[in-house]
Image (spheres, helix red, strand yellow):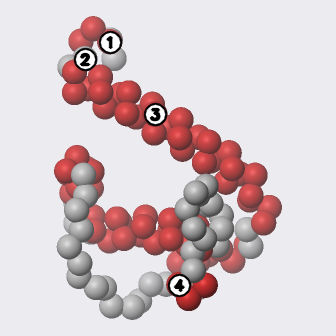
Amino acid sequence: MDEKTRTLKEHLASLALKTELARQEVEWREFERQQEFIPNAWYRMDKIAPCTEPKQQITLRLDRDMVKFYRTLGRGYQGRMNAILRTYMLARISRVITVDGQPEVPLEER
């Protein structure tokens, strides 16, 4: 898209996207480096240990644009958001993703 025809909102979203992609690229490189330590069973986790426990209703405040995006994906958008959060949780618990300055996930929550 021509930079001159972009609206301010489109330009700001483009900058935010570039920043987010750069951050994710750093995380992805670290993830690739750690691949040799991930057991093969991890890739079949949805079949080995599917999430069948009942859902708990909570009040959650999310960025408006993010909610709008997921809603445009249609029915099941909350389940997709749950799956993404579950994946992040499992990656943190298994230490595939580590975050400097944040405490380790407590043993009771593993």
Q: Earlier in the sequence, mark 1 or mark 3?
A: 1
Q: In percent of the image, x 33 and y 91: which residue is there?
A: 54
* Residue 56 image position (x, y, % from top left): 28, 85
| Residue topped by disc 2 | 6
Q: In percent of the image, x 59 and y 40: which residue is there?
A: 25
Estimate how packed mark 4 is, as few (under 14), some (14 to 19) or many (20 or more) residues with alpha carbons within 10 Å: few
The image quadrant that residue 105 belongs to is: bottom right
Q: How far separated are the C-alphas under marks 4 and 1?
A: 47 Å
| Residue topped by disc 4 | 109
Verify CB contact (< 8 Å) between mark 2 and mark 3.
no
Helix, strand or loop at label 4? It is helix
Verify CB contact (< 8 Å) between mark 4 and mark 1.
no
Foreground disc of the pair 1, 3: 3
Q: In percent of the image, x 68 and y 45: which residue is there?
A: 29
Q: How far separated are the C-alphas under marks 4 and 2?
A: 46 Å
Tell me if 95 is positioned left or right of 72 in this view: right
